[in-house]
Amino acid sequence: MEKVRADKWLWSVRIFKSRTQATDACKQKKISIGELNLKPSHQISVGDEVLVKKNGFNFQFLVKKLIQKRVGASLAVECYDNITPADELNKYESWYIGKARPEWRERGAGRPTKKERRTIDDFKKDYFNIDDDEL
């Protein structure tokens, strides 16, 4: 196998969750090699540098291995090198910080009382260094 479809490869190495999303990204000109915007049927080969514009970020991948079937994440990582510039990765990581799970309480604990709410608010003010009006 010397070449594989762009949408199929992007889906199989888990850059997109579905092949439809990969196809749509190609049609919206969010996938390119150099200055060439790829169609879903464009043939990718080993050594190509693929630029993927996804969620406002520009990722770059170097194709190391061609696959046509979707594989596990540990195997998919072996098929490409992430050559995204450091400043773009930092932008992505700074955006991702703070996207953890929302607060939660044990099942059956009910809503916090006024006293518990004040304790939680005081903790947040101290921990996150925020003012009363920001909370």
Image: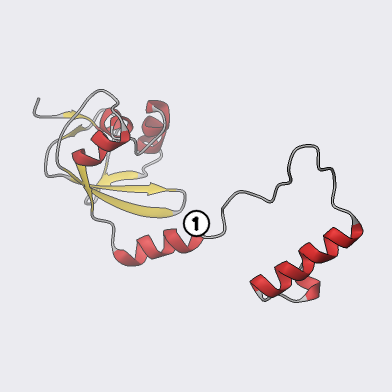
Left or right of residue 80, residue 47 in this image? left
Image quadrant where one finds the C terminus: bottom right
Query: In this view of the protein, which residue sits in the foreground, 75 or 41?
Result: 75
Query: In this view of the protein, which residue sits in the foreground, 101 or 80?
Result: 101
Direction left: furthest residue: 2
Instruction: Identify whether 1 is placed above or below 98.
Output: above
x and y, in percent, of residue 92 in the image: 43, 58
**Amino acid beneath label 1:** Tyr
- Quadrant assignment, res 126: bottom right
Residue pointed to by mark 1: 96
Left or right of residue 85, residue 102 in this image? right
Instruction: Identify whether 82 is placed above or below 18.
Output: below
Query: In this view of the protein, which residue sits in the foreground, 131 or 81?
Result: 131
Q: Residues within 10 Å of mark 1 (few under 14, many from 20)?
A: few
Left or right of residue 44, residue 55 in this image? right
Q: Which secondary structure, mark 1?
A: helix
At 69% from the left and 51% from the top, the residue drawn is: 103
x and y, in percent, of residue 108 in the image: 80, 37
At 30% from the left and 26% from the top, the residue drawn is: 70
x and y, in percent, of residue 41 in the image: 26, 28
Q: How is the image coloured?
A: secondary structure
At 18% from the left and 28% from the top, the residue drawn is: 4
x and y, in percent, of residue 62 in the image: 19, 47
Query: In this view of the protein, which residue sits in the foreground, 7 or 118?
Result: 118
Direction right: furthest residue: 114
